[in-house]
Amino acid sequence: MDTLGFLAHGFAQALTPQNLMFAFIGSVLGTLVGVLPGIGPTSGIAILLPLTGFLPPAPAIIMLAAIYYGAMYGGSTTAILVNIPGEVASVVTTLDGYQMARQGRAGPALAIAAISSFVAGTLGLVGLTFFAPPLADVALRIGPPEYFGLVVLAFSVVVSLSGPSLVKGLSAAALGALVALIGLDPMSGVRRFAFGTATLLSGVDFIAVIIGLFAVTEVLVGVEEAVGAVSLAPLGRLMPRWDELKACVGTMLRATGVGFFLGLLPGCTPGAISFISYDIEKRVSKTPERFGHGAIEGVAAPEGANNATTSGGFVPLFALGIPATPALAVLLSGLMIYGLQPGPLLFEKQPLFVWTVIASMYIGNVMLLILNLPLVGLWARMVRIPYAVMAPLILIFSVLGAYSVRNSFFDVAMALVFGVLGYLMVKLAYPTPPLVLALILTPMLESALRQSLNMAHGSASIFATRPIAILFIGLGIALTVWTLLSRRRR
Amino acid sequence: MWRIALTLLLSLIVIVGSALTAPVEAQPAYPTRPVEIIVAYAPGGAADVAARLVAAYASKKWGQPVNVVNMPGASGITGTLRAIGARPDGYTLLLDPHSSSAMLFAVESDVPFKMEGKTPIALLTLDPVVYTVKEDSPWKSLKDVAAAAKADPKTFRYGIAGVAGIASFSVSQFLYSAGVPIAETNRVVFTGGAPTLTALAGGHVDFAGQQWSESAGLIQGRKIRGLAVVHPTRLPGLAEVPTAKEAGFPDLDVVGWQGLAGPPKLPAAVVQKWTALLEEASKDPHAFWQFQQDELKKYLPLATRMGIRK
Amino acid sequence: MLLATVYYRRVRRTSLLSAGILLVLGVLALVEALRLRDDWLGAKLMPAVVGAVLIVLGAAHLVRPAATPEWPDAAGFRRVALIFVVLALYVAVLPYVGFLPATAAFVLVLVRALGAFSWAATIGVTVAIALASHLVFIYWLGMSLT
């Protein structure tokens, strides 16, 4: 049977009332879990995995996949409403999404997030459906030198996010890079910046940092300015304007492309991908100065990229048995418990199973849209809750979220430390996104660089033999130069 | 280096064996409240999956929740410290894999806890090493690899997951016994088994020696080829891959494993309850039908049987 | 020479402070890089690079004049400090006192400090939030905070 035939069969299976119900439950649970800061898809799936234990394989997998998509969506809700990214990938959504919420436009922000997620996720699934095996082979050809090139390219975004002062932006980035180096070097096991303590040895957890920099900082700022609520602006319409939607079409398509293809590469974190997608939108826009102050494309791009990345991440998972992110690794172990053997033979040996799962992912995407669009009104009203109630809630969530990542109070302390740091950065006009981006990218940069050099006995000549890597590095340098020049002109 | 590791490993097995022969005392029914198994690694890895499978089975049998708690960090030191510092009442246990046991102590000289500072309960799984190359590699046997590496060490690239990981031991042991000048080869360090084998499949490195659970999928999918397994017999599911002995290298003996352990001075009755459960599990076909289907081939042997391995 | 530049451009105190912090961190990073026992292309590489970058950026702060920051007024500063201290205390006692009591106390103080509710409403909100978060995190998700 050909692909379409299998897919049709898969839909027939997936559309049974029982499976639909489990997709629904999974979406709801995943969204709820994703809303809790610090509990992103990884811990969410790990926590909810036992719940699926009593189910037969197909519904269980359907539920797990729905949980995964749901968790990714849930993270954006809090990112928009209260500036708390639910997980790494939602950090970029806060840049414009939260600003939109403060302007009373939480509704359109949430709506476009749902719509963009749906469109990009579905298109990504189409890519998965038809191109999985050949794409997986392409993914294999990306080795350390090419990764290095990609990360160089991603670093060029730092310049673009630096705001008016390049020195301040770069300083923030350098700080982020330094924090990323604390702990045990994953490649050589050498202890760095641990100063003899066992706690610092585990490094500073990324989620704790962003909870501090975003949630705690926002509360401190809000308290200082004695705001009555997150937003007292009159709540406008709940849906984006028609012209805005049209403007976002291009955004969604670009975000899908970027998210899907970069999501294919194991090890390319969704956080970095959403930054890249955001930056691309900013560059192609005719009015880039809107970004950072509530541009709707600034929400559509990262949200779309995230879901496309999710779909892209399933390609190496199904076709090679390689999880692209830790969340997918947990999903993989869940799949294996149910007898699914991901790998190149998956499509041959267990076609019906696979296609049922893929079909239910399509359905999951639809379900999330149907679930969340009506709720936009409810969520949007939450920004008007008096700050006296909101602030304690946010702080409790922050404390628990930071703790939950590694069951460690050290992480909570880190969240507080970075909360203060973030507050100072806001007061002194240092931009926070470069710090976050550097925190994400530095480990990738380091491992890619060292691995590449190791491949050629320490010489940089390895790069001369890898055209794709040179291409990426060249692009990165070109983009950086271009951004610097266009800043001069302004 | 691996000799020390091996000695430590064997002594651990002996310790487990003697713990199992401890007398049974009369105790109130354990467990009476939820049990926690601490996994000192991130969710999704071999250790985590092993813990979750055991936890699921134990929960069902005993009717009390057995929860897996992940405490990753510092190559497993963080979580291990927490587990062995807990009260020895049987409600906090440790998923104890090779990477935070013998191998860690062989590599690190100042680990903040002692290897004997815990109560071993049982060996849960064995994860043999499989030496692999790219599917279309010209090397068809370990001897080919050895010859090529000796002929031109400067272009020989091998990948390992972590400098103190299992592959560091398995590949070095192989290269030493083959007489390859290691200092002239290229060692590329990755952060985990999956990236290492992905790089192998993509041709970015030429040779690897990771665990079976990590390698089986790509081998069966024909992206990488297994050259030898470090095990007394050929592995089910990898029937065409010879054992290290058959491949001409009988001295290779690095193996991965996961075990269950508890804080020091754990009551013998608790240990006994677990070992009884695990023995029963290894005989219960329904519960472990899934095991047989998995890529993680799980043995649940008792340590005494494994002590006879060498 | 550097002092002359600093004086001439009338560098703000905050710029000096930022420059100082960056320079100190940069030196720290370089020292750590030198201390490590690994190849230069191994664990030492990034700390050295980042250290150098930090030092350069620290110096850059001295050369470019910075805008005056907007410091909060005294009342605002007191509020921020209070909330932060309360938060730190909450985190400190949490593992010892237990989730429900610590959270209830925390919420009580915050709502009282931030809002203009009657005592009845304050208590009501406190109980609601504390109970709800206990249910979700401790009971349902099974987080253990000891």
Image: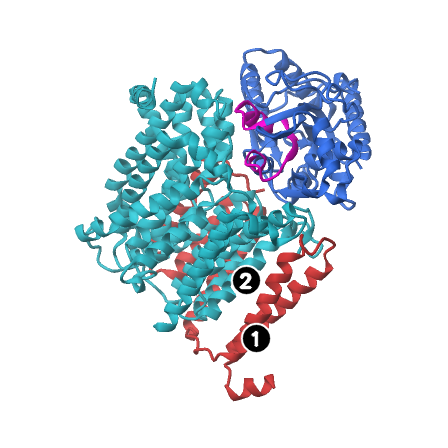
Of residues A90 and B159, which is closer to you in this image? B159
Which numbered disc covers residue A412?
none
Chain (blue): B
* Whole-percent x, y for residue A454 in the image: 65, 47
The N terminus of chain C, quarter of image: bottom right
Answer whether residue A55 is visible to the viewer in this image: no
Query: Amino acid under label 2?
Result: Leu
Query: Where's the C terminus of chain C, which quadrant?
Result: top right
Q: Nearer the viewer, residue A160 or B67?
A: A160
Verify whether residue B200 appears in magenta.
Answer: yes
Which chain hosts label 2?
A
Q: Secondary structure at mark 1?
A: helix
Above or below, comparing residue C67 to residue B207 in the picture: below
- Residue B303 drawn at (x, y percent): 74, 20
Residue marked by disc 1: C59
Direction left: furthest residue? A242
Numbered disc total: 2
Task: Name the residue nearer the viewer: A24 or A461.
Answer: A461
Does residue A350 belong to the magenta stretch?
A: no
Point 43% across, 35% down: residue: A135
* Crowd tier of the residue under label 1, counting other residues whose Cα lies within 10 Å: few below 14, some 14–19, many 20 or above: some
Q: Which residue is mark 2?
A: A175
As displayed, is residue B107 above or below residue A331?
below
Q: Is residue A97 visible?
A: yes
> What is chain C's hue in the picture?
red
* Chain in cyan colour: A
- Quadrant of res C134: top left
Q: Which residues are magenta?
A: B198-224
Residue C34 vertical placement versus A1 (above, below): below
Q: Is residue B25 left or right of residue A256?
A: right
In the rendered structure, the answer to whether residue B142 lies left or right of residue A54 reads: right
